[in-house]
Amino acid sequence: MNNFKSERGITLIEIIASIAILAIIILAFMPMFTQTMRTSSISTDILDATYLAQSKMEEVYHLSTTSTFDDAKSQIEDMSLVETENSWYHYEQTTDDYYIYLSIKEPQNELSNVLVKVYRDNTKSKLESQMESIYRWEN
């Protein structure tokens, strides 16, 4: 019974020691938390860019099944024709966060190469996502 009635409390030194131990533990885990935040941010950017590339690929696929190549060249949504070289047609689109570059090769034997690249901005310094496929164009 005497142990329960003791009025002895925690000393200031014990409190400071426990705070120091907690601080050391927290500081040991801080780099892990910051790295996790950085990795999460990068993953989100790549996922968004991949979604944009996939959307453009699906748009071109839809055009390849519903129209001829000559008709489809002018029907690519929200993109402007940048240049034409060696049977490749290059389109670009700038969104709020990304620069999308689409290349479509004129069909040979009904098959056409399609390449979508998504960059961080129009300087093309950082490639976020890239997709390539071959589509069969209906005549």
Image (cartoon, helix red, strand yellow):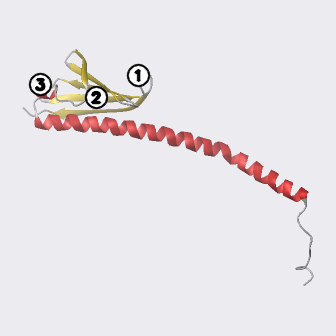
CA gap, disc 1 to disc 2? 15 Å
Q: Name the residue under label 2.
A: 115
Residue positioned 9% across, 34% down in the render: 138
Q: Mark 3 points at which residue?
A: 70
At label 3, the amino acid type is Asp
- Compared across the picture, whether 96 is left or right of 78 comes to right
Residue positioned 19% across, 28% down in the render: 112
Where residue 45 appears, x then y in whole percent?
44, 37
Residue 109 appears in the picture as rendered: no
Where residue 33 appears, x then y in whole percent?
62, 45
The outermost residue toward the bottom is 1
At label 1, the amino acid type is Lys
The outermost residue toward the left is 139
- Compared across the picture, whether 56 is left or right of 127 comes to left
- The disc placed on residue 124 is 1
At label 2, the amino acid type is Leu
Helix, strand or loop under label 1: loop
